[in-house]
Amino acid sequence: MISGLLRRPAAASVLSLIGVLAFYVLIGGVDLGTLFSAASWVNYAARIGIVALPVGLLMISGEIDISIGAMIPAGAMTTAIISGHYELPIIFGILGALGIGVIVGTINGVLAVRTNVPTLIITLATLVGMQGVILAGSKLLTGSASVPLTTPDWAKGVFGQLMFNGSHQVLIVWWVIFAVIFWFILHQSRFGNWIFAIGGDKVSARNAGIPVDRMTILMFIGTATAASFVGMCHAMQFNSAQVSGGMNDIFNIIVSVVVGGVLLTGGFGSIPGVFVGTLTFAIVNKGIDFTAIDRNWSNLIIGVMLLVAVAMNESFRKLALSAVSGKAGSSTQNAPRGATTGQSAQ
Amino acid sequence: MKLTKVLAMTAAVAMSATFAVAQDGGPNIFVIGGKPDDPFWSRVKLGAEHAGLVAEMHGGSVTWLGPQNYDNLGPDAAELIRQAIDQGADAIVGPDWVPEAMDPAFEAVVAAGIPLVIYNAGGIDAADRLGAMNYVGAVDYKSGEAAGVYLAEAGHTNGACVNTLPGAANIEAFCNGFNDGMAAAGGTGSVLQLPATAFGDSTAVAQAVRAHLLQNPEITAMFAIGDQDTNATISGIQQAGKTGSVHVCGMNFNDSILANIQAGTQACAIDQQGYQQGFFATSILINHVQYGTTIPTREILTGPGIVDASNVELVIAGVQDGAR
Amino acid sequence: MTTQTQTRGSALLLGKLARRPETGSLIGFVVVFAFFAALGGPVFMGAPGWSSWLNIAAEVGIIALPVGLLMISGEFDISVGSVVPASSMITAMLAGHYDLPALVAICAGLGTGLLIGLVNGLLVTRTTIPSLIVTIGVMFVVMGLTLGFAVLIKGSTSVSYVPDPTTKFLLGQFINNMFNVAILWWLGFAVVFFYVLHISPLGNWIFALGGDPESARNAGIPTAKVTIGLFMASGFCAAFVGVAQVMTYQQAQVAGGQAFIFNSIMCVVIGGVLLTGGAGSILGILLGTLTFAVVNQGVFFAALDPNVGSIIAGALLLAAVLSNDTFRALALSAAAEKG
């Protein structure tokens, strides 16, 4: 049974999580009780987690989206400008933020489907473009690069408040809800099979009758809208929105997804893995604050843990593949390329 | 696998070298500040850590909490403030960069009965509003204003503020202050805004400054924030061939900036005395937690001080220590 | 009769030119330059304008060259963003803080880049982790080490250093007070990389790696060595930029350099390098770099909001890649016709 568990894609990410906790407790002197009662890393996990879920789906299908870095502040600024600066009812702010996600996602998706341009470049272009749009728009419309916002109670309660009189944000509940939804899509519905198939071999998938184009566009809409949703919630939670480049978010989200066991080349991964990968990264990032280790070394710890976690993932995946297929573990390409032969896993 | 083990062991060895035990007996102060690789904030951190020697003497500690980057300044800082509460802080030092985002977190600190000192941003107004004990620091707006007034009064009346981090509330305050200071002394101010992708790239800043000066020859004064941007601005002015006709004031300084002032390529540097901010804010709380003392002078201004050719020699010695 | 053959001959030549991938990059450059020349007027067209964007082009260009080669061979290098400040800090620290001779400090800085490249290369070839992830991890590690040691040794995050006249002349001066000497170094690097990619057998190996690494290995190409060598080259070039920056601006900072990551990728892609590996050229990369620099700097001369520059850069990136796509399709179809 243990070997069966080990072969699941999420197994490596769970082990990474345990390893990270062990490191912080043994070497960093972290008190687990304090760590688990603290909300900061869970809030942070929810923030990147909500975006990591659809990004994970997208990466399993063989594509990537880095424009999310600019979409998070885009959602925040849209809500703040519409409902804060122009003082329109908050419902318009919400629709605006989601709308801009849908628009940019559609652009990404259509470009991905209609041209041969790799999605890394398409989304790099939309990232750079959106960075400019947000800042130019903000300066043009409001004259400043940060905008305050007051939210009516009902909206704040649903999207942007702290729960249990404590420090946990309601965003965490949204994260769990989305995780369940995406788990259902990927692992229980036929859409999931389609996504794995597209990630395995796009041409065969299309030949098999899977609506590859429509699925791709939908997934890009998913990532962009999830990002702008997170931005919107943050704006409501913190009563303000700020222009930013969002570069760090990009790396953090990709790292969470990869630590969660998703293959960069597509065709392999799981939602539980992405969920646990996000938790692991959040603890890596925030856990150092709970130790006496000098903050100056925090990036070093993040980098080393990333490399170790991914190396573990690779070893476990090879084990899983060799056991599942029964053949000698085939070596898959490392660099992101067009169609590769991956293996679909449950 | 072997490589993995090597990586893990290297990390462990490296970490144990810097490992120190967190104490339980004395005051545990949590200081929220900027990111560790920010040159200004590394001085603030040093000040807090030096004050922390006293805390350690009592069996306590000083913990520094800073965001990874400035992309999401207010929310990230608010989260860190709440994290400090969760980590069991005896007292908290924090900057009120973005009041809308951070005030609720500060209010939670006071509601939990934790002594609070506001520093670096917000002014005595923030301290009064939030129920903090003191305010320690310079006010960003006033620092920019000092630079604007200094340059305009020296006769350089058309100024531009170089903003390489659009969106960050503190930088916006600097530039607003600069422009208002220029206006108050009879000049005009403007902002040279760079895209977010130029942050940290000296060449991009230098070339942008140079292009801007060539296209706008009426500019005679510039204000840059941070040592890197100031040096890049000076280089840009040099490349535009305008050394001597365009005068620069910079926010904060290090030994290269002081060398500039000595050599005459820079007019002035505004000193927030970041070291003092960290040192005093932390010390006030250490002594309060340990002995119950207070400082009735609630507003303690550490700046703006102006460093120019007249006092640069005195300042140089302090820079060697990383304190100024 | 002869006139007909002549016209047909020159039409064929034009057709051949049109199908080269670099033509797309060249057209892009001309269009962008004309656009900003129209907006920026005489100042942009004069020497100050040229030197302005050439200075930018030189810095990102030196990094874009090996990054382009890596992408042709199918790999990414995200760590360049952290190598630049790391090497500049080491150089400035050894020469400025410890007062060692400039040559020793420079060698140490360049050596750092080589070492980081070696680590990247080993991790990519010895494990199955994709290079995108390896280099992100190494980037974090280097960032952490740079900051940690800087504060440990110097107590601050910046080091200043005034280079001696010879070093400044070679690495950090502005010719005519306008053109950074880095431009000459960039051209020098371009010549070297041109030779490597287009004349030496190493170039064929790189293209083969990008096309299909399995077949390349089976054909006897030392793929591991080539990959490691390419990563060391990108580390070296990033370190060179860091060292040059210290000599030019007389100080080193821990933060900074992140912009080079995506900027260099943009230059390379605008220059026609295929992300999936296997196609590209040095000339294309050079043109892509020039185009990127013109857009970046042109906005300041054109009195446009610099954020409009970001929007233009994004649109340009897409346009460039789309047109490269079309040109490549044309080229492939032309080749198929002949065959």
Image: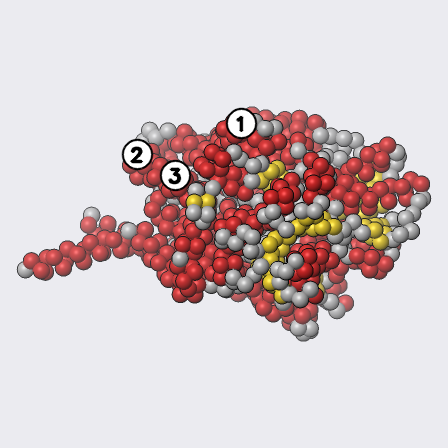
Contact (Cβ within 8 Å) of mark 1 with mark 3: no
Q: Which residue is mark 2?
A: C200
- Residue A270, which numbered label? none
- The chain carrying label 2 is C
Which amino acid is tagged 1? Pro
Separation of residues labelled 1 and 2 (CA atoms): 36 Å
Q: Which residue is mark 1?
A: C101
Point out the frontmost of discs 1 and 2: 1
Most extreme residue toward the right is B292
Which amino acid is tagged 2? Ser
Q: Earlier in the sequence, mark 1 or mark 3?
A: 1
Q: Which residue is mark 3?
A: C189
Q: Position of residue B222 (x, y in %)?
A: 60, 56
Q: Position of residue B318 (x, y in %)?
A: 72, 38
Specify whether disc 2 shares its chain with disc 3: yes
Neighbor class of circle 3 (other Cα within 10 Å; few <14, some 14-19, many 20+) is some
Q: Earlier in the sequence, mark 1 or mark 2?
A: 1
Residue A292 sits above or below residue A129 on the image: above
Q: Is residue A32 left or right of residue A88?
A: right
- Residue drawn at the location 85% of the way across and 36% of the way down: B55
Contact (Cβ within 8 Å) of mark 2 with mark 3: no
In terms of depth relative to the viewer, which is nearer, B157 or C140? B157
Residue C339 sits above or below residue C311 on the image: above
Q: Earlier in the sequence, mark 2 or mark 3?
A: 3
- Residue drawn at the location 66% of the way across and 50% of the way down: B268
The answer to whether any part of residue C272 appears in the image is no
- The chain carrying label 3 is C
Q: Position of residue C130 (x, y in %)?
A: 49, 39
Point out the frontmost of discs 1 and 3: 1
Separation of residues labelled 1 and 3 (CA atoms): 25 Å
